[in-house]
Image (spheres, rainbow, N blue to C red):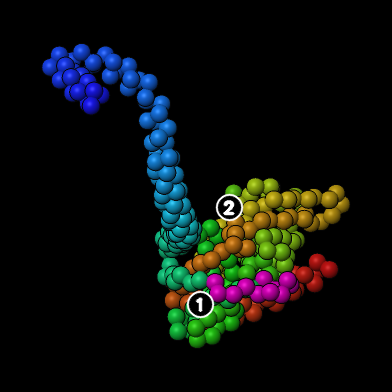
Amino acid sequence: MTAVLLSIVIMVLDHRYNHLESLRSGLSVLLFPVQYLASLPVILSESASDAITSRSELESVREKLQAENLTLRARQQKFEALEAENMRLRGLLDSSFKVGDRVLIAELIAVEQDPFRQQVLINKGSTSELFVGQPVVDANAVVGQVTHINPLSASVLLITDATHALPVQVNRNGLRTIALGTGLINRLELPHLPNNADIKVGDLLTTSGLGGSFPPGYPVAEVIDVNREPGQPFASVIAQTTAHLDRIREVLLVWTLDPDMGTDAPAAEETVDAAAETQAIREDGE
């Protein structure tokens, strides 16, 4: 009973006069560690729950970002391929203006696997009015000639094939000669050039237009080696093709504007004549 009365008196005094405020403040400081320890399990539980939730959310976000990254990288690869294709097509379109003739873009669909045969297959044929002996070029230079035609495809013999011969001239001085294929994908040889012929490393070889198979003035190759042996009548000249024959994807089929040179029969005859001339030159060299 005494304790109850004492408590009431203290409560009244504290309420009216705030005599116990300093005592309450001191006790709160002393009791703070006890209160913190009492609430620590709850704090730890909430922190653990937040950590688990945050980790789960982060894992979900990470997986989502990884999936988006893979998708974007795949699209980037496709865009890079499309950009490269677009650049090639733009180059071919620009080449069509340079040639000045009727042209048609075709794509490679197969490459001859025979190491001794430099030949490719394109996706245009007789339905596109192709003809045997038709010149084929790319954005850089001459590629080859059409040798066989199907309704939806055609075979193109590359200028580096060992049976191919191409009339060319040195762009610097107009010196005319024949460029023969060597069987290597990017090499041509110029046989029977005299030792004193005005030709040197770095000279650009262009089509001469002789024979009517190829439009004149189109790049063919660049001379990379001239070997003049004393006492020998002819120099050994090697040229590197300007066209990247090992990586072409699209080509241009060319129709000459001269109607007398656009028929099938003369083109076929020119191809046969070129092959015969090549064989004769090689036999003479031997």
> The residue tagged with tag 2: helix, strand or loop?
loop
Q: Is 245 included in the stretch rendered in magenta? A: no
- Mark 1 or 2, nearer chain start: 1
Q: Nearer the viewer, residue 111 or 104?
A: 111
Which secondary structure, mark 1?
Answer: loop
Q: Which residue is mark 1?
A: 123
Q: List the single residue furthest toward the left.
A: 16
Q: Is 166 or 156 nearer to us in this picture? A: 156
- Residue at 54% x, 72% y: name it: 108
The picture places residue 81, in percent across and down from the top left corner, at 48, 60
Residue at image location 67% in from the left, 52% down from the top? 223
Main secondary structure type of the part rendered in magenta: loop
Q: Is residue 132 visible?
A: no
Q: Position of residue 21 (x, y in %)?
A: 23, 16
Q: Residue at horizontal 64%, vertical 79%?
A: 272
> Badge 2 is on which residue?
171
Q: Around disc 1, counting alpha carbons within 10 Å, would you say few (fewer than 14), some (14 to 19), or many (20 or more)?
A: some
State the image coordinates of residue 236 (x, y, percent, origin top left). 77, 55
Is 224 drawn above or below residue 78 in the view shown?
above
Label 1 to label 2: alpha-carbon separation: 33 Å
Outermost residue toward the bottom in this view:
151
Q: Type of residue at label 2?
A: Asn
* 60 versus 12 height, above or below: below
| The one of 137 and 169 positioned closer to us in this rendering | 137
Apparent side of residue 228 relative to residue 134 in the rendered image (left or right): right
Are the residues flagged by discs 1 and 2 in contact, CB closer than 8 Å?
A: no
Image quadrant for the N terminus?
top left
Q: Amino acid at mark 1?
A: Asn
Q: Which residues lie in the magenta part?
A: 108-118
